[in-house]
Amino acid sequence: MARERVVIGLSGGVDSSVSAWLLKQQGYEVIGLFMKNWEDDDDSEYCSTRQDWLDAASVADVIGIDIEAVNFAAEYKDRVFAEFLREYSAGRTPNPDVLCNAEIKFKAFLDHAMRMGAERIATGHYARVRHVESGPQAGQVQLLKALDGTKDQSYFLHRLNQAQLARTLFPLGETPKSEVRRLAREIGLPNAAKKDSTGICFIGERPFQEFLNRYLPTKPGPILTDDGREVGKHDGLAFYTLGQRKGLGIGGVKGRQAEDGTALAWYTARKDLANNVLYVVQGHDHPWLLSGELQAQDASWVAGAPPEAGHYGAKTRYRQPDAGCSLLDGAGDGRFALRFDEPQWAVTPGQSAVLYDGDVCLGGGIIA
């Protein structure tokens, strides 16, 4: 009997490498695919594509699977990076990882894998897929959180649809990260100790503003406090995000003090695009930094239709616990509203609001 062919995205990192090994152990015919998504400054100290490819190829060699490289840089620039710049220009803070998953890893990559004769694709994401056998949701495919809550990446995958999830395997969904590292050492993978990549794929570890400066014009303007006092100048609203504390350049400005006499930290709290004003406030719990509800747009629901109004959990950023909330309206026009049980800190336009029913990721939208 022919073995089922699975094409796995091999990034050169330890998670996708161990995933590939696990799939081979489970009897699949595994082929690795290395995706090149960025080539504007490949030779710089910040862009690690060449080293990642060497790592991925040597992992494939150790595991004993074929690997090929595919260049999605044009698709990435059109579908992910252009949108990223549009959002920043509009004063919002987008999440390119969410877009990259929806447009590249589970669209361009999935299509390419199917042309290679794959029945399914796999990635090293920490998440789970469940095929519902019975009950009112029989026949549906659900996206679930990973068992290792500290590594769960369902937030970044919430825009996947039924057709994409039905063909996707997440081999690490039930495996703690510590066990993944242990397996990598045991198998003798050359990248067993490689540190996890952080930050946005095309920016790497470089200074963020320096990168954005190459693509967006600086448009300086005043920095005002909540009572209208000017305390500095900003370089352009695109370069700041709500809740930002570092890099404001106003550290020495006198203002409110904590009970022990130390100065309260300054935070970015609002952007006035019409007048090009950046507003800052002092203290982590300033009312301008707290939101009792939010509006979201461009909604995408895993089941293909919005969930019913009711009580759920939501994340407004990765790596935060689910916040209890009421879904007021999951109307079919791609918009919805959430009202939180407790005010949420620095809810940021452009980021994703992702809805959960326990472990089940229902989908979400872009915070308006």
Image (spheres, rainbow, N blue to C red):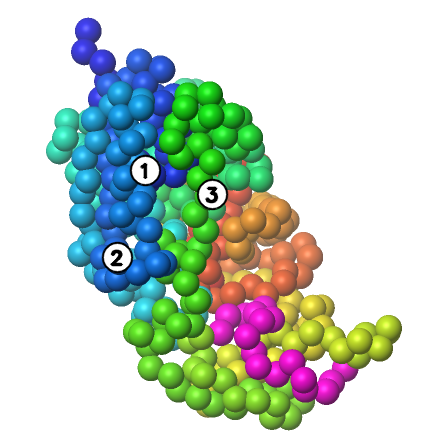
Question: Dot 1: within a 10 Å radius of its alpha carbon, few (fewer than 14), some, or many (20 or more) residues?
Answer: many
Circle on res. 286: none
Residue 131, percent from left and from top: 39, 25
Q: Earlier in the sequence, mark 3 or mark 2?
A: 2
**Most common secondary structure along the magenta stretch:** loop
- As drawn, the residue found furthest toward the bottom would be 229
**Residue 248 counted in the magenta span:** yes
The kind of residue on which mark 1 rests is Asp
Quarter of the figure with residue 38: bottom left
Instruction: Give the Cα separation between the discs numbered 3 and 2.
Output: 20 Å
- As drawn, the residue found furthest toward the top would be 1
The kind of residue on which mark 3 rests is Lys
Circle on res. 42: 2
Instruction: Give the Cα separation between the discs numbered 1 and 2.
Output: 16 Å
Task: Tell me what residue is drawn at x 21 percent, y 44 percent.
Answer: 108
Q: Is residue 126 visible?
A: no
Circle on res. 195: 3
Q: Which residues are magenta?
A: 240-256
Instruction: Give the Cα separation between the discs numbered 1 and 3.
Output: 12 Å
The kind of residue on which mark 2 rests is Asp
Residue 59, percent from left and from top: 32, 30
Residue that mark 1 sits on: 55
**Residue 367 counted in the magenta span:** no
133 above or below 234? above
Residue 99, percent from left and from top: 34, 53
Q: Is residue 245 visible?
A: yes
Check contact, mark 1 vs mark 2: CB within 8 A: no
| Element assignment for label 3 | loop
Asked whether, in this view, residue 166 is left or right of residue 176, the answer is left
